[in-house]
Image (tube, rainbow, N blue to C red):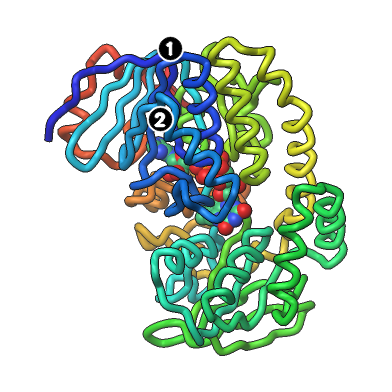
Amino acid sequence: MNAESKRSFDVAVIGGGPAGMGAATVAAECGLSVVLLDDNPGLGGQIWRGESGSSKHTQASHWFDRVGRSSVEWILEARVFQVGKGHLSAESPDTVHQIAYSHLILATGARERFLPFPGWTLPNVLGAGALHSLIKSGLPVEGKRIVIAGTGPLLLAVAAYAREKGAQVACIAEQTTGAKFACFGLSVLLVPEELEEVWQLAWQLQAVPHWKNCWPVAALGKERLEAVRLSHHGRIREIASDYLACGFHLVPSLELAQFIGCAIQDGYVAVDENQQTCIPGVYCAGEPTGIGGFELALVEGQIAGFAAANRKDLARKLWRRRDAGLRHVRALRRAFELRDELRNMPQEDTLVCRCEDVPFGLLRAHQSWQSAKLHSRCGMGPCQGRVCGAAAEFLFGWSNSSVRPPLFPVRCSSLAEMPVETIPEIHEGGSK
Ligand SMILES: Cc1cc2nc3c(=O)[nH]c(=O)nc-3n(C[C@H](O)[C@H](O)[C@H](O)COP(=O)(O)OP(=O)(O)OC[C@H]3O[C@@H](n4cnc5c(N)ncnc54)[C@H](O)[C@@H]3O)c2cc1C
């Protein structure tokens, strides 16, 4: 392992999805030196992963081309595990990057929310986005029967993509009510840029049953998934299936923001009109400030990039588009709010923390995430609570705001290479 010498940039952007690409590109175009770090092997984030300048997605193509022509220096397969005042450390497979910055833009995106139910740990039960990524990377699904369950528009995108690749989508089980879904549909139809995509999805999915008030009760099978038991309008249905792709909307990735002490409001990073957090010089864009899709993430990223470059005049020109996107965030929240009945999905022996094998029944005895962690090791495995923490928050109402370094499991040698002056003091809720 070799530690790269400390390098300095005007702006460090963490996250190479639409928000990070937008932020880094415009800041560099304004003349700043910019580094963009992402833990994936390519830029593009969740939605444009595996795409490039030749993508058929016009927006992706535009931004890959633009970032490629800019002076942005991007470092891939580099996970930022530590951020201090004006300094960050990121681990790559064979090195540790020490980076000094004047402005920091957090564009760390979101991940899927999983909720536990009997059988959810069986092979071939996957996250909806995870199945999407696997198909994109070559998993053959032709002729396979797939049930897609949970909540949110991602289910539709995954269903359409799986069908395009030859899968037989048995049904989409959406937990929200028909009325809430219809209101969401109307709000989308009011956005002209979304119309084409909506009609395309509707056309692709016209033959797929789309059940509302429907959620998984159990995944059944011996060695792997064989069938899915669903509750649909209070009736139980059983559907034979090769895969169950399940996701209960998205949860923002807040660890880095919490770690450096950014204010969190209603579960998201609080920002001002220029995407600046409560910490001067630290901006946040994209899903950590509200789940609103890639168009909003792109606009927020550009606002943050312009603001970091002190071009608030250019940032201001994008406010109106950002504010329209924020209406979409509110519509999404209302439409796909999780219903109370989902808290009854797990049974006493259903694992909630699959890293440390902690069942629901054991967790119920505790009053807080902290207590559950200390007594059961819940959230202390390799995922560090990223899966079970969000589930426990919904199931028990526990808040999980305490973050400690290192933010991700890292090599001991990477920790040893951190400059001593950058190691933060720890306090409950983040670093000082
Ligand atoms: C699993 C999944 C699948 C999705 N699929 C679709 C889809 O098919 N269609 C659609 O319209 N929308 C999809 N979405 C939603 C879409 O991804 C977002 O609307 C959009 O990508 C948001 O852009 P962003 O830049 O905010 O975040 P993201 O695109 O999530 O980008 C954030 C990036 O930051 C990186 N990152 C996070 N923390 C660190 C760290 N510590 N160090 C280094 N890098 C870090 C992440 O790996 C990621 O690459 C999906 C979301 C998820 C979670």
Q: Is residue 368 visible?
A: no
Determine the residue positioned at 72% across, 18% down: 316
255 relative to 337, above or below = above
Residue occupied by mark 1: 102
Residue 328 appears at what percent x and percent y? 76, 44
- What is the three-letter code of the residue carrying label 2? Leu
Mark 1 and mark 2 lie on one chain; the one further toward the N terminus is: 2
230 relative to 189, above or below = below
225 relative to 276, above or below = below
Q: Secondary structure at mark 1?
A: strand
Is residue 137 left or right of 161 when viewed as pictured? Answer: left
Determine the residue positioned at 65% across, 42% down: 295
Determine the residue positioned at 48% across, 87% down: 226
- What is the three-letter code of the residue carrying label 1? Ser
Q: Quadrant of the N terminus?
A: top left
Residue 99 appears at what percent x and percent y? 31, 20
Task: Give the camera-side residue of 213 and 365.
Answer: 213
- The CB of the residue at mark 1 lies under 8 Å from ligand 1: no
Is residue 206 left or right of 429 when viewed as pictured? Answer: right
Which quadrant holds residue 268? Answer: top right
How many C-alpha atoms fall within 10 Å of the one at disc 1: few (<14), some, or many (≥20)?
some
Q: Which mark is residue 36?
A: 2
Q: Secondary structure at mark 2?
A: strand
Is residue 184 left or right of 222 when viewed as pictured? Answer: right
How many C-alpha atoms fall within 10 Å of the one at disc 2: few (<14), some, or many (≥20)?
many
Which quadrant holds residue 199? Answer: bottom right
- The CB of the residue at mark 2 lies under 8 Å from ligand 1: no
